[in-house]
Image: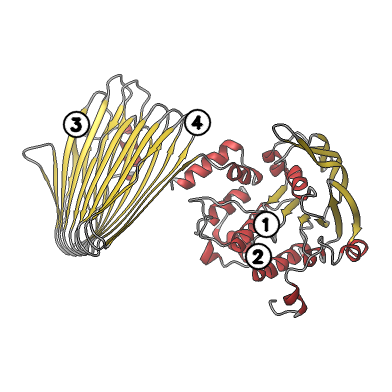
Amino acid sequence: MLELRNIRFKAEDDDSSKEIIRDINLEIPDGKFVVITGPNGGGKSTLAKLIAGIEKPTGGSIIFDSEDITDKSITERARMGIGFAFQQPVRFKGITVFDLLKIASGTKLSVSQACDYLSEVGLCARDYINREVNASLSGGELKRIEIATILARNVKLAVFDEPEAGIDLWSFNNLIRIFENMRGSKEKRTVIVISHQERILNIADEIIVLADGEVTEQGSRDAILPKIIGSGYAKNACPKIEKGGEANA
Amino acid sequence: MPEMDAVQLRLLQEVAGLHDIPEGAYNLRANGQSVGRNTTANIDIQTKKEASGIDIHIKSGTKKESVHIPVVLSQSGLKETVYNDFYVGDDCDVLIVAGCGIDNCGTQDSEHDGIHRFFIGKNSKIRYVEKHYGSGDGSGKRILDPVTEAYIDEGSTMEMEMVQIKGVDSTKRTTIAQLKKDAKLVVRERLMTHGQQSAESIYKVTLSEDGSSADVVSRSVARDESFQKLDLCIIGDAQCSGHTECDSIIMDKGRILAVPSLEANSTEAQLVHEAAIGKIAGEQLIKLMTLGLTEQEAEEQIINGFLK
């Protein structure tokens, strides 16, 4: 279980400070698929970074599996089983997809295991395993590799920061399928996704709306989704294609 | 012939990846003396008469053979200049592995300057691997000033892999190449300096005839208070294509001067250069830390990958 208690975060500039997160209290039980939505600048990405330890809160505490992790580093949290997928996946010169999966798994990963993770995200290992994680990969490919690293880590809690950002529609449809599989998998990991996309909101157990640094709505998908549908917080990837049904499925 | 000791064998492994005597043609040099040589029906090695060094003759049509000529120095204060000339015939496909390892535990400087010249015939394919490595905790410096010259005839290709990752205090590496019609040169240099080391890497590649091409890429990392100068120049005298790239990571108080340059003497010459110097991106470190590595482990992984 992940608990945020009175979490605050202030971004300090040279001469000004802005409160990005104001007193957030949340409880996310194990095995749930939670989607956080809300307007741009509402503090969603900051919240994701606070959970992964990339940002440190200016107040409050974060409890994971009954342990206070507020002062723990990114590495310590990662080793406790928290995974984080970047909105803009990072590129590396010289580091191959296989290298990255090996680092993620923390073991001597075999080629066939790496192949399993890659096929789960719809990539053929033969084409990708020796590719460098560099600018030669498209946004969609990088996103899928990013997700494969989370799968390889076998985390208890996976946080995805806007997985749909910067990818094409075709890749987006595949992405939805990966999330659906993840949700249906027997591992029962907790998944937190930051997203505006209606199709991602549609597979949530629970939806949280974050606006102006505060939780404005929280509840089951059935309770929340009807209230926000059609607003900027629950968008279609492309209205025309969505209307046309499964044109891209 | 003298036997090699444990230190020399370790150096041999570092520079040539050899645990034992290699297969095929070889010449092993330790502390200024030849400690082993083998020739084959197609590859002959002769000691030079007028200077220190060897002449290597590779017959036309030699395919899938290799020549190893590693040098190890473990005696403090030894300074040597060695001239090795490679004469490669036509239609060959050969791997040449050179390199020098210095272990200096003493107080005097040790220096090995290998001058390698390649005279490559027509339609041959040469892969040349050169690794330099230094170890030992003495105050004497480990100095390597290698010179590589390659004269590449029509239709031949030369790939050079130049690696210096550790332990060499001072180096000035000069590589000169001249390419004839349809000849091709590919260089992949990997350089890392640390402590107070200084490294200078100079390339001067002349594309003298139509259809010739060169791709010279240097990746380097400067740590601690080390200094690097990367001077990569391509000269295009004909209808040719050339690309040079210096890509460097700078850390601690390291300094890097990258001077890529191009000289076109023909309107048909297509030449491109790129240079970039920067520290390790914070987001790269963070990404690897979210995968469970410490900051230091993340840094090592990034550098290892970059220099791979």
The answer to the question of whether label 2 and label 1 lie on touching residues, with beta carbons closer than 8 A, is yes
Q: Is residue A237 left or right of residue B23?
A: right
**Labels 2, 3: one chain:** no
Label 1 sits on residue: A151
Label 4 sits on residue: B252
Height in image: A97 above or below A13?
below
Label 3 sits on residue: B80
Residue B300, percent across and down? 52, 40
Q: Amino acid at mark 4?
A: Asp
The answer to the question of whether label 1 and label 3 lie on touching residues, with beta carbons closer than 8 A, is no
The chain to which mark 3 is attached is: B
Label 2 vs 1, first from the N-terminus: 2
Q: What's the distance in space between the residues labelled 3 and 4, CA to CA?
A: 34 Å
Q: Amino acid at mark 3?
A: Glu
Residue A123, percent across and down? 59, 66
Which of the two discs, 3 and 4, sits closer to the camera?
4
Q: What's the distance in space between the residues labelled 1 and 3, CA to CA?
A: 55 Å
The chain to which mark 2 is attached is: A
Residue A25 seen anywhere in this rendered image of the structure: yes
Q: Quadrant of residue A150?
A: bottom right
Query: The C terminus of chain A appears in which quarter of the rendering?
Result: bottom right
Task: Work out whether residue B120 or residue B32 is closer to the camera in this orientation and state it.
Answer: B120
**Labels 1, 3: one chain:** no
The answer to the question of whether label 4 and label 1 lie on touching residues, with beta carbons closer than 8 A, is no
The answer to the question of whether label 2 and label 4 lie on touching residues, with beta carbons closer than 8 A, is no
Q: Residue furthest right?
A: A223
Q: Amino acid at mark 1?
A: Leu
Q: What's the distance in space between the residues labelled 2 and 4, CA to CA?
A: 41 Å
